[in-house]
Amino acid sequence: MAALDLFGRRWNLRILWELRDGPLGFRPLQQRCDGMSSSVLQQRLTELQETLLVERDVNGAYRLTALGRDAHAELRGLVSWADRWATELDRHPSARPAAEP
């Protein structure tokens, strides 16, 4: 359940997703995450480092660890499902997920 709590926190999955192609510095990562606040990004990166999914390289950029790459590999199935779900929702305009508060 700890993994669900970690991945359920806003932005954590997005950060893992954005690091999928390789290391990114803080500002480029922030831009890819729709300009989230620097304080929130710093909190999430600290959390992901403490849980061994993200690390900083010698240049100070953030990258996925081996465990982080494993998590990303597992998330690809969720992305495939999300694409199928979006297609189905488009076919049924009355069916929409609830908006976030």
Image: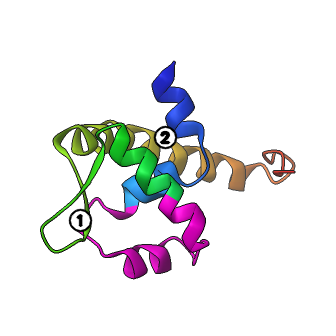
Colour convention of the picture: rainbow
Q: Please tell me whether mark 1 or mark 2 is closer to you in this view.
A: 1
Residue at 16%, 74% in the rendered image? 59
Which residue was labeled with disc 2? 81
Image x and y of residue 100, in percent: 81, 51
Camera-nearest residue between 95 and 50: 50
Q: Amino acid at mark 2?
A: Trp
Residue 92 located left or right of residue 69: right
Image x and y of residue 92, in percent: 77, 48
- Magenta highlight on residue 24: yes
Residue at 51%, 70% in the rendered image? 33
Q: Secondary structure at mark 1?
A: loop
Q: Are marks 1 and 2 in contact (CB under 8 Å)?
A: no
Q: Residues within 10 Å of mark 2 (few under 14, many from 20)?
A: few
Instruction: Give the distance between the C-alpha atoms of the residues marked 1 and 2, in whole angstroms.
Output: 21 Å
Q: Which mark is residue 21?
A: 1
Image x and y of residue 88, in percent: 65, 46
Residue at 61%, 50% in the rendered image? 10
Q: Which residues are magenta?
A: 18-42
Q: Amino acid at mark 1?
A: Asp
Residue 101 located left or right of residue 49: right
Residue 62 located left or right of residue 84: left
Q: Which one is earlier in the sequence, the residue at label 1 or at label 2?
A: 1
- Quarter of the view holding residue 85: top right
